Image: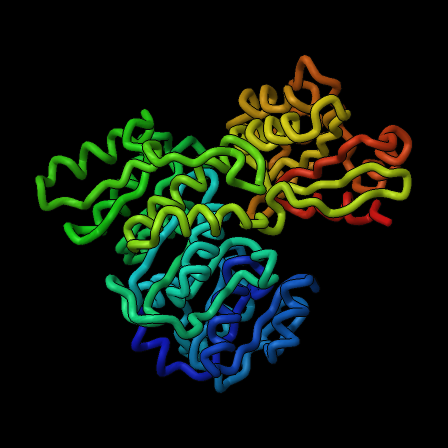
Amino acid sequence: MKSDNSFLKNVRNIHFVGIGGIGVSAIARMMIFEGKRVSGSDVSDSLITRELKKLGAKIYMGHGTDNLAKDIDLVVYTTAVAKDNPELEKAKKLKIPALTYSQTLGAVSKGKYTVAVSGTHGKTTTTAMIAKILIDAKLAPTIIVGSLLKKENSNFIAAKGGPRHGRAAKGDLFVCEACEYNRAFLDLSPKILVITNIEEDHLDYYKDLRDIQNAFAELAGKLGKDGFLVCNPNDKNLKPIVKKLARLGRDATKIIDYSKIRLSADALKVPGEHNIKNGKAALGVAKILKIKNEAAIKSLSSFPGVWRRFEYKGKTKNGVAVYDDYAHHPTEIKATLKAACGRFGDKKIFCVFQPHLFSRTRLLMDDFAESFGDADEVIVANIYAARERDDGSVNGRDLAERIKNVSARHIGSFKEIKKFLKKNARRGDVIITMGAGDIFKVGESMLV
């Protein structure tokens, strides 16, 4: 079906399958803001579904045919749901148009001046940093981010007032994350593309690194001569993409090298070398949009971080600090623990890691095993299956046994992990729950 912005404008009643997901819920918020009637289903209640309910959405727990009213104009769904999902099957039977989350995001993108933030790591934080800069500069951006912005407690920010901008009319500036899984980001129509970095990931879908690079190159190729690519062109994994653009000639996409932008660690509240790089990428976007560098850096200096990115959760009754981080790839784990080591000095760090996906754990096992060197104690939980089924080829114990040079153990259940931490973590120690699943519940359950 045609998935453009004009189609979305004419839709009145939308049903979301998997409405509690961080991406799908942002689109749902946007549609509510635009005055559309929204309903949706998910497998469990959450902060996100409760907030959507407060905004007026009708939320169903569990998936079933009765959830889908006959007057629905459009179904939007996450690809994480099964192909035989009863709501999708009913939509097909009733001939109700259905779009994936990425197709819907692409439809929004076609009607706006889009800043798309892509990369294996750092997408969410960089998107949030850009959002902070643009909001402070009163450029009235519309924002969709893959987490909750701390100040707004939302993954969607609607355009609010602001002057007409040199590159985009008032309200037409759109900032979003561009996810590479399934080549979903190819649905977008960016004018500015940020590529934070490229590494091997999602190898349940991609063949290898070259296949991943080809996907990013295809996305960059959509920019055209009036577009901008913000990246580190000297990064070895980005060079093939930059070379392809260079072959297009002098009218090709303009490249902004964020590695040359100056930004000190002292200018940021969020720790870590990786966040300095994220900040530089955000400053690259600010430069394109003609925001003064001093103003952009001032915005970054008060950037509080985002939900589940080195997020301080509180302290336990016996004085143990609890943090949570979304890191679920070896490089992200290393970066987060390195930042934690720099911040906490000699304090003992307990890292509670929940692997995400059986395929990722199996294919990157050696890299995972070498990622925890800056922790003092590592607890590996059972693998969070997400969209996969357990074929018995790998489990959390396998990873725990491969981790060397640091104390590591496998404790499958959250209840037993909590019991271990209560017994072994002392006042002044730090617990960091880590992973893309629901491991954050362990830390939250221990707070005063």
Pinpoint residue 357: horizontal percent, then vertical percent: 58, 39
User: Which residue lies most toward the bottom here?
Assistant: 71
Q: Check the image and tell me how it is coloured.
A: rainbow
User: Which residue lies most toward the front here?
Assistant: 294
443 left or right of 73?
A: right
Q: Quadrant of the N terminus?
A: bottom left
Picture quarter containing residue 382?
top right
User: Which residue lies most toward the top here?
Assistant: 405
Q: Nearer the viewer, residue 306 or 39?
A: 306
Specify whether residue 110 is in view. no
Q: Nearer the viewer, residue 256 or 405?
A: 256
Q: For the point 49% across and 77% down, which residue is it?
A: 33
Specify whether residue 275 is in view. yes
Q: For the point 72% across and 34% down, which residue is it?
A: 352
Q: Nearer the viewer, residue 90 or 213?
A: 213
Q: For the point 76% across and 40% down, which residue is it?
A: 322
Pinpoint residue 151: horizontal percent, then vertical percent: 60, 60
Pinpoint residue 313: horizontal percent, then vertical percent: 73, 47
Picture quarter containing residue 18?
bottom right
153 over 389 or under it: above or below: below
> Count the marks: how many?
0
Pinpoint residue 351: horizontal percent, then vertical percent: 71, 31
Q: For the point 32% across and 25% down, which residue is it?
A: 236
Q: Nearer the viewer, residue 41 or 197?
A: 197
